[in-house]
Amino acid sequence: MTKTPEWRPIALGLYKFVQEAGQQIHLMMAGAVITIIPILLLYFITQKQFTESIARSGLKG
């Protein structure tokens, strides 16, 4: 967590957005998609290294 209100975790921003959006499901889903896009991009870019590291951790050396 940070001490300044300008820099908060993205989950807190999504939570506050959902509170303001009320019962508008389409706005809540749009916020959720925008929140998860950077995580998915990072995974797809590093997918090969990620899966290789999991495969190597199961091997005995």
Image: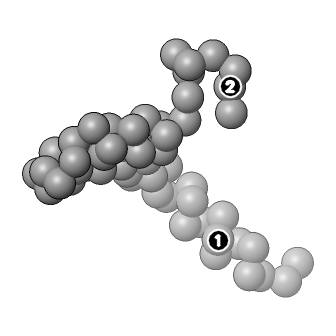
Residue 32 visible in the picture: yes
Q: On the rendered image, what quadrant is the C terminus found in?
A: bottom right
Residue at the image position 22 percent from the left and 42 percent from the top: 21
Place of residue 43 in the rendered image (x, y in percent of width and height, measured from the top left): 45, 52
Label at residue 11: none
Residue 41 visible in the picture: no
The Cα–Cα distance between marks 2 and 1, rounded to whole angstroms, is 32 Å
Residues marked 2 and 1 touching at CB (< 8 Å): no
Pair 2/1: label in front: 2
* SS type, badge 1: helix
Residue at the image position 64 percent from the left and 71 percent from the top: 54
Q: In the rendered view, does 5 fall on the left or right side of 10? A: right
Name the kind of residue labelled 2 in the image: Thr
* SS type, badge 2: loop
Residue at the image position 68 percent from the left and 25 percent from the top: 2
Name the kind of residue labelled 1 in the image: Ile
Vertical arrangement, residue 34 with respect to residue 25, above or below: above
Extreme residue in the right direction: 61
Place of residue 41 in the rendered image (x, y in percent of width and height, measured from the top left): 37, 44
Label at residue 54: 1
Label at residue 2: 2
Crowding at mark 1 (Cα within 10 Å: few <14, some 14-19, many 20+): few
Tell me the quarter of the picture where residue 31 sits: top left
Tell me how many marks there are.
2
Place of residue 18 in the rendered image (x, y in percent of width and height, measured from the top left): 30, 45
